[in-house]
Amino acid sequence: MAKQTWKPGNMLYPLPAVMVSTADKAGNSNILTIAWTGTVCTNPPMAYISVRPERYSYHMIRESGEFVINLTTKKLARAADYCGVRSGKDVDKWKECHLTRGTASTLKYAPVIEESPVQIECRVKSIQELGSHHMFLAEVTAVQVDESYMDAKGKFDLNRTGLIAYSHGEYLDLGKKLGTFGYSVRKKRIKKKTT
């Protein structure tokens, strides 16, 4: 198999395409779409987002020290794209995308996006100015989930929400299940013969 060597760059795909909601201390709020986000630690629960300082929401996150990671679905794909290519300086993304500001349970300023099936409330612990992007390292203070995705046993069925991913400039619908955690080493059950 022939290979090409390219200059250093980020080719780690697919990524989550999330909408981050935030607000400044004066109550001005905005939504920006982020693909550079992820889990950092389980205990304490921590996540990060990386944002260019030129982005309209950057100063809001830096000032309030809060943001919400709102997971996106097939139904929210158009809004996710719009919030990534339009600036809150020029348009009201809440209004244009018909999204509803909701109240975070643990944050003072940042709202949640009600239409999202999962809202991860975050409080900034540190900011690392890395270059083109600054990384906001944050503690997860609460997670809100849409009760309509709870199954009969009270388990949240995240994979039924229609999550999407972002890969190399494209939004993708997550496909069918290939296995579950640990399936590659799980022992096969031997069926007993009945006589």
Image (cartoon, grey):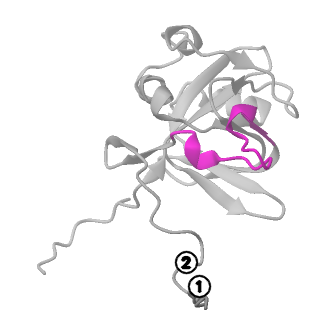
Residue 129 in the image: above or below residue 82:
below
- Residue type, mark 2 in image: Tyr
Residue 125 in the image: above or below residue 27:
below
| Residue 114: percent from left, percent from top | 68, 23
Residue at 72 percent across and 47 percent down: it is: 156
Q: Nearer the viewer, residue 112 or 110?
A: 112
Residue 133 in the image: above or below residue 10:
above
| Residue 178: percent from left, percent from top | 45, 65
- Residue type, mark 1 in image: Arg
Residue at 47 percent across and 47 percent down: it is: 132
Residue at 58 percent across and 87 percent down: it is: 191
What quarter of the picture does the N terminus occupy? bottom left
What quarter of the picture does the C terminus occupy? bottom right
Q: Which residues are magenta?
A: 143-162
Residue 184 in the image: above or below residue 23:
below
Q: Which mark is residue 183?
A: 2
Q: Write down the quadrant of residue 77 in the picture.
A: top left
Residue at the limit of the structure toward the left, as seen here: 2
Q: Which residue is mark 1?
A: 186
Q: Is residue 26 magenta?
A: no
